[in-house]
């Protein structure tokens, strides 16, 4: 019996013959791509690709169901608190800049909304300069 290369490959782990008759490595280094099948919060399929399943798993946690951190202004959800905190930045109106898609307000208004979140307020202040009414007596 004559063997061609394909058959030999197929008989040896970790190769596997697929429906199309070709051989593919199982868990091999070449074509194992883990694609995210979830939807982003805006309804668009995510389709981010990862080489390792654990990376996909970690990424998938940023999708709904595990979005434990919510913006108190627009209620957008975030998987990580630092992402959520960084997002508040986008709500702060900057002088000379046009308002974008997000609702814009002054640093002070944002502070009122997140009242109690001292760390976040500190962060925002250091970024946007405590300008406005610092140490007003
Ligand atoms: Zn994703
Ligand atoms: Zn928001």
Image (cartoon, helix red, strand yellow):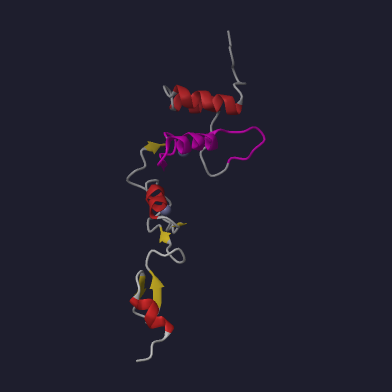
x then y, percent, for residue 4: 41, 86
From the viewer's side, name the closer residue of 100 and 69: 69
Residue 40 at least partly seen: no
**Numbered marks: total:** 0
x then y, percent, for residue 75: 40, 39
Q: Is residue 87 above or below residue 109?
A: below
Q: Quadrant of residue 66?
A: top left
**Is residue 56 part of the magenta span, yes or no?**
no
Q: What residue appears at the point 58 percent right and 40 percent down from the top-left corner? A: 99
The reply, left or right, for residue 128 in relation to residue 114 is right
Q: What residue appears at the point 41 percent right and 60 percent down from the top-left corner? A: 35
Q: What residue appears at the point 43 percent right and 62 percent down from the top-left corner? A: 33
Q: Is residue 3 above or below residue 58?
A: below
Residue 125 at least partly seen: yes
Q: Given the current orientation, which residue lies at the most extreme top position?
A: 137
Which residues make up the magenta segment? 72-99
Q: What residue appears at the point 38 percent right and 87 percent down from the top-left corner? A: 3
x then y, percent, for residue 67: 37, 42
From the viewer's side, name the closer residue of 133 and 118: 118
């Amino acid at each position: 019996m004559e063997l061609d290369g394909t058959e030999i490959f197929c008989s040896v782990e970790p190769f596997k013959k697929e429906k199309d008759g070709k051989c593919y490595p199982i868990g091999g280094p070449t074509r194992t791509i883990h694609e995210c099948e979830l939807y982003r919060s805006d309804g668009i399929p995510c389709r981010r690709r990862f080489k390792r399943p654990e990376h996909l798993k970690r990424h998938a946690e940023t999708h709904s169901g595990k979005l434990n951190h919510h913006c108190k202004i627009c209620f957008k959800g975030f998987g990580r608190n630092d992402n959520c905190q960084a997002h508040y930045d986008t709500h702060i109106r900057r002088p000379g800049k046009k308002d974008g898609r997000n609702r814009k307000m002054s640093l002070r208004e944002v502070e009122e909304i997140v009242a109690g979140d001292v760390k976040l307020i500190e962060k925002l202040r250091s970024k946007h300069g405590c300008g406005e009414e610092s140490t007003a007596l």
